[in-house]
Amino acid sequence: MTPSGNRLAGKVTLVTGSSPFINGGIACGLAEEGAKLVCIDYRLDYAEACAKEIRDGGGEAIAVACDVTKDEQVQAAVKRAEEAFGAPDILVNGAMLQIRKGLLDMSADEFRRLLDVGIIGTFLFTQHAAKSMIRHKRPGSIINIISTEGHQGNLGNIGYGTTKSGLLNFTRAAAMELAEHGIRVNSLTPTATDPTEGRDRAEAWGVDWDQVSLSIKRTDLSSGDQGIPLGKRPSPRHYARAAVFLASDDAEMITGFDLRVDGGAISRYWRWNPGTKILPKD
Ligand SMILES: NC(=O)c1ccc[n+]([C@@H]2O[C@H](COP(=O)([O-])OP(=O)(O)OC[C@H]3O[C@@H](n4cnc5c(N)ncnc54)[C@H](O)[C@@H]3O)[C@@H](O)[C@H]2O)c1
């Protein structure tokens, strides 16, 4: 990444779950606009590689190892950010994991684990980052990463979709509570994402990242594009542009909002197959 703009010049920015894929792409996109990045992950190799890509491109970044589900680790991460750069201006809650199981197969512990990382992790980071912003009188912007599965019922992934759906209302409620402090809270909804940038970035970082094979083994990487009205799945750079917008003053009157960067996936009428002119006949 190379700094190319200044829409977020000097903004202290925390990104959780900074893998080489979506959140890493978002972190680099925010840094390109001048933000100072705190790359956070419980995998230190990811956090360090993300920060290194930003520094190598001329930006400022540090890595912090942190499990988002642990209150004391989250507090320590926010403190580390304050010591390195000052109080946070921007927080992106992106850490999440996948346990792809359905209602009839998933254990309560597995379901709890997803809620813990997705909802408790977002709650803890939002709470401690917001306290720091308030203490230092910094108006801030918080962005929670959702998923199409938070808006629609999917097969065989009940804990993930439930977690993401819960974050939609967490976003609205936190937005109301923090409005008086000038802190905006929004969400960003990605959808099934082209893995190319993730694979390229993982190779450049020298880390293992095998997310696609964790779900469905695909030989045809265009698989999944067919359902998207705009004809292809988005890439992390598309999410990064939306995150820059939500974090910047351009969005100064936007709070409690979900910005969908999904090529039209959620708006699509269920009977229409993109690429065709008419609805299928019964
Ligand atoms: N991949 C997709 O197509 C897609 C689609 C929609 C939404 N999303 C969302 O985008 C975000 C990034 O997803 P991704 O596909 O890049 O996944 P990813 O697995 O590459 O990144 C998630 C990161 O979260 C980290 N993490 C997990 N548990 C953690 C914990 N307890 N503490 C700290 N870090 C933890 C992981 O180490 C990983 O680096 C997630 O919120 C995901 O739900 C992804």
Image: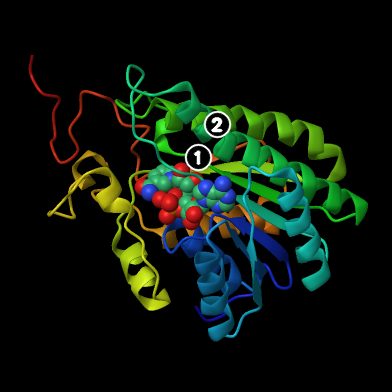
Is 175 situated above or below 81?
above
Residue 232 placement, left or right of 93: left
Point out which mark residue 26 bears: none
What residue would you read off at disc 2? 115
The residue where tag 1 is placed is 146
**Residue 154 position in % (x across, y down):** 33, 26
Secondary structure beneath dot 2 equals helix
How far apart are the two marked residues, 1 and 2, measured between alpha carbons? 13 Å
Q: How is the image coloured?
A: rainbow
Using the image, determine if residue 128 lies above or below residue 166. Answer: below
Q: Amino acid at mark 1?
A: Ile
What residue is drawn where x is 15% and y is 41%? 275
Q: Are marks 1 and 2 in contact (CB under 8 Å)?
A: no
Answer yes or no: is residue 85 visible.
no
Residue 62 screen position, x and y as percent: 66, 72
Can you name the residue that lies furthest to the top here?
Answer: 282
Q: Is residue 7 left or right of residue 28?
A: right
- Packing grade of label 2 (10 A; few <14, some 14-19, many >=20) is many
In terms of secondary structure, where does tag 1 sit?
loop
Query: Which mark is in front, 1 or 2?
Result: 2
Q: Quadrant of the C terminus?
A: top left
The answer to whether mark 1 is within 8 Å of ligand 1 is: yes
Circle 1 residues within 10 Å: few <14, some 14–19, many ≥20: many
Nearer to the camera, 101 or 270: 101
**Corner quadrant of residue 243:** bottom right
State the image quarter where residue 195 is shown: bottom left
* Residue 52 appears in view: yes
